[in-house]
Amino acid sequence: MLIFPLLNDTSRKIIHIDMDAFFAAVEIRDNPRLKGKPVIIGSDPRKTGGRGVVATCSYEARAFGIHSAMSSKEAYQRCPQAIFIPGNYEKYLKVGQQIREIFLRYTDLIEPMSIDEAYLDVTENKLGIRSAVKIARLIQNDIWQELHLTASAGVSYNKFLAKMASDFQKPQGLTVILPDHAEDFLKQMDVAKFHGVGRKTVEKLHSMNVFTGADLQKIPETTLIDHFGRLGFDLYRKARGIHNSAVKPNRIRKSIGKEKTYGKLLRLEEDIKKELTLLSNKVALNLQKHKKSGKIIILKIRYADFSTITKRRTLKEVTQNTDDIAQTAIQLYESLVEKDKAIRLLGVTVTGF
């Protein structure tokens, strides 16, 4: 027996555009000598003492198992011949704006997820084209002809499926998921590839012998809600291709942070600094995932008596580096007058993108 009604709006036409290895592709375009070589956008570990993370890399580098958010040190160990490029975010932002101008030819309903990724609602579009697939092909062609870059596209009736579709065939892919085919498409998918399903949720699903969409479709809604709460409600619907979140044109991510509440209060300075480093690493990985860099670091502390303070510091340059974030967060902590109070919660946030 279902707790909530299954409402599935299949009338919308949603496109998800995801640029292929965007930062690396821009560098290869601007320097043809890099074509066909393993290119990594990130700090060269030989010059930074092993510090830094991979922002993105070419498909030649991915053949060595390298991926975004991997440490530059590990990337170098996997592929010593890789070419490391620090990255030019101003250049990437400019190209990203050119891509957005292409989107605007077709619709104003654009929800950017990062500099190189966006949802477009083309149910009603500026050119009156009835086929969303045709629009997706036109956008891919415009990007190639004008910017000499490739993009993958997913077309479906909601954002979740459009995203799943764009990831299905990369690079230069175009995948369409029709309403009648959605459940069959999802049956074959590894639950780890379900958009919005994190690593811990995947581990919990695996412990329930749920490995594919087909496995997930067999689990009763009440069971999923018992195990995952609100997320179980979403999982039940996603497994059936139901996701009615609208494309939000004004969605702009202004900060990325991570905080943790501790059942056992933190008292030792060593433990507090260790936790700040762990939180900073998670924030840095999230910044890499969303291709963001910021220059304002915010430390949040909630004490045992539930009093809460925040401190911030503005860096000279934007960063997405774990060491920069952790070092600043620890310095903010060290600047506190009261360091002998037990801590209930710590939070680290980066903003000022």
Image (cartoon, rainbow, N blue to C red):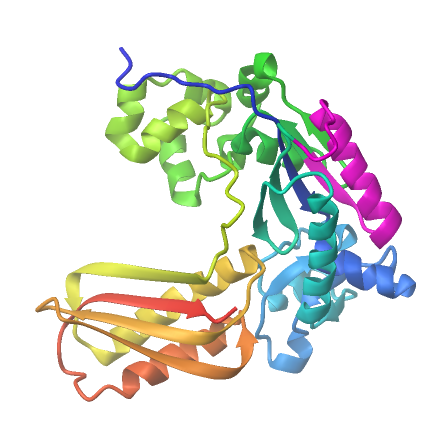
Is residue 142 shown left or right of residue 23?
Answer: right
Is residue 278 visible to us here? no
Residue drawn 8% across the image and 69% down it: 305
Residue drawn 48% across the image and 71% down it: 352
Q: Provide residue 279's location: percent of width, then percent of height.
A: 37, 65
Tell how many labels. Answer: 0
Q: Provide residue 243's location: percent of width, then percent of height.
A: 46, 28
As drawn, 81 above or below 335: above
Residue drawn 27% across the image and 60% down it: 260
Q: Quadrant of residue 203?
A: top left
Q: Quadrant of residue 171?
A: top right
Q: Quadrant of residue 103?
A: top right
Q: Is residue 148 magenta?
A: yes
Task: Please give the range of residues in magenta.
Answer: 125-153
State the quadrant of the N terminus. Answer: top left
Is residue 66 visible to us here? yes
Is residue 15 shown left or right of residue 197?
Answer: right
Residue drawn 57% across the image and 25% down it: 12
Is residue 200 shown left or right of residue 141?
Answer: left
Q: Provide residue 34's location: percent of width, then percent of height.
A: 86, 63
Q: Is residue 108 magenta?
A: no
As drawn, 111 above or below 347: above
